[in-house]
Each structure stands twice: as structure tokens, then as C-alpha cells.
Image: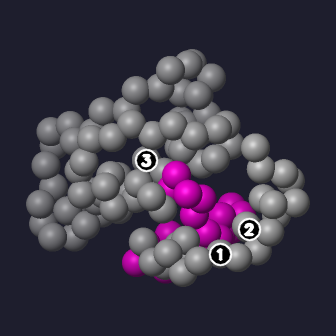
Amino acid sequence: MKSFQNEIQELKTIQPFQELSYFIRRPSVIETLRKKGISYFFPIQYETFDQIKFGADLIGRDKTGSGKTIAYSLPILERLRNEKALGKPNPLPKFLIILPTRELAIQVKG
């Protein structure tokens, strides 16, 4: 188990692939995330971003507060924006997200 000091040290050594701009091209999205206090991705987020964005099925597990909700929602939104920009909007469902608890569903909705 990592100590609190080790986690702080890890946060101070952010790698380029953790930067938001590495994954998200729209400056307005990056600015919105930064206003909400998000300036880089956690491991669950950067390790799954491209897989989700390009339609892979996956199951991600990580501790509470690790950013799993952002890990799946941002790549989905990026994919939908790209499809719309390319003139490929499709009304059919594209994603299925299953939430294990009502509390998490409320959190994700809000």
C-alpha cells in the first residue's frame, strides 16, 4: 500500500501522457475541466481513454475517487463529437453504461 507521501510525490511528477491536451483536442473542454479542478488524468483515465474512444469493450476497476466516471464519460463524449463533426450522427444507442448503485447513478447524472 502506498503511503500518503508517495502519492503526493507521484502527483508532482506528471508525465506528458497524463496531460489533458494529449487526449482532448477542444480547448473549451480542457478549460471546462480545469475550472472543475481537473488538470491531468489519473491512471484509470489515461490507460483507458483511447480504448473507450475507439469503441473497445472493457471493465475498469479502481479505488473510490480515482476518476472512473470521467474515465468512461470523456472518451465517449469525444467520440460522439468527432462523429458529429464528420457528419456521421446516428440515432441508435452507441454505449451501454451500467452503474451498480443508485447513489452512483445520481452522481453521474449531476
Q: Quadrant of residue 9?
A: bottom right
- Which of the pair 38/50 is nearer the observer? 50
Question: Mark 3 belongs to which amino acid?
Answer: Tyr
Tell me the crowding category of disc 2: few under 14, some 14 to 19, or many 20 or more residues within 10 angstroms, Cα based.
few
Vertical order, 95 against 71 (above or below) = above
Q: Which residue is mark 3?
A: 72
- Which of the pair 72/83 is nearer the observer? 72
Tell me the crowding category of disc 1: few under 14, some 14 to 19, or many 20 or more residues within 10 angstroms, Cα based.
few
**Considering only order in the chain, which callout, 3 or 2, is on the residue closer to the N terminus?**
2
Position of residue 11 measured from the top left corner of the image (x, y, whole percent): 73, 68
Marks 2 and 1, Cα distance to the nearest angstrom? 6 Å
The answer to whether one can see residue 33 in this image is no
Q: Which residue is mark 1?
A: 14
Q: Is residue 49 left or right of residue 18?
A: left
Position of residue 15 measured from the top left corner of the image (x, y, whole percent): 59, 77
Q: Which residue is mark 2?
A: 11
Determine which of the numbered discs, if any, sits on residue 82 in the image. Answer: none
Image quarter where the N terminus lies is: top right
Q: Is residue 93 left or right of residue 35?
A: left
Q: From which residue to which does the magenta span run? A: 24-45
Q: Quadrant of residue 89?
A: bottom left
Mark 3 secondary-structure assignment:
helix
Mark 2 secondary-structure assignment:
helix
- Which of the pair 105/68 is nearer the observer? 68
Q: Residue 26: within the magenta?
A: yes
Residue at 65 percent of width and 75 percent of height: 14
Tell me the crowding category of disc 3: few under 14, some 14 to 19, or many 20 or more residues within 10 angstroms, Cα based.
many
Q: Are the residues flagged by discs 2 and 1 in contact, CB closer than 8 Å?
A: yes
Question: Mark 1 belongs to which amino acid?
Answer: Ile
Position of residue 84 measured from the top left corner of the image (x, y, whole percent): 21, 63
Residue at 33 percent of width and 40 percent of height: 58
